[in-house]
Image: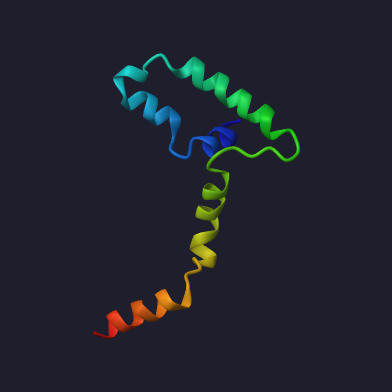
Amino acid sequence: VRRAARRALAAGPRVRAQALPLARGAHPHLDHAEKLFAEMYSQDGVRLPGDRRVAARGRTPTEGVRIPKALYDTIQELAAG
């Protein structure tokens, strides 16, 4: 269930709720949201905003990122001075 919430709310929602005075008392709502997201993810083909970004963050350390060759060439020129 926490995994579903992390996907939907990329930053830690409980940490945020504890840090923001206005969010105190939000825990029951977060628990409800986690259950809702878990139920949604149990259905085939469901995606929530941020899913691709979270997945990309997981791949980046091992696969890197793709950039256009022109940008790479510009970076190399600037690095060479």
Identify the image quadrant of residue 4: top right
Residue drawn at the location 53% of the way across and 65% of the way down:
62
Q: Is residue 62 above or below residue 17?
A: below
Left or right of residue 36: residue 19: left
Residue drawn at the location 54% of the way across and 36% of the way down:
8
Indicate the colouring scheme. Answer: rainbow
Across and down, in percent, residue 27 comes to: 46, 18
Residue drawn at the location 59% of the way across and 37% of the way down:
48
Which residue, as the protein is rendered here, is positioned at the far bottom? Answer: 80
Identify the image quadrant of residue 25: top left
Across and down, in percent, residue 39 comes to: 68, 27
Left or right of residue 72: residue 41: right
Residue drawn at the location 54% of the way across and 66% of the way down:
63
Q: Split into 4 quadrants, where in the image is the C terminus?
A: bottom left
Q: Is residue 30 above or below residue 57?
A: above
Across and down, in percent, residue 59 comes to: 55, 59
Total number of numbered discs in the rendering: 0
Q: Is residue 65 above or below residue 27?
A: below
Which one is nearer the viewer's eye here, 20 or 79? 79
Which one is nearer the viewer's eye here, 10 or 49? 49
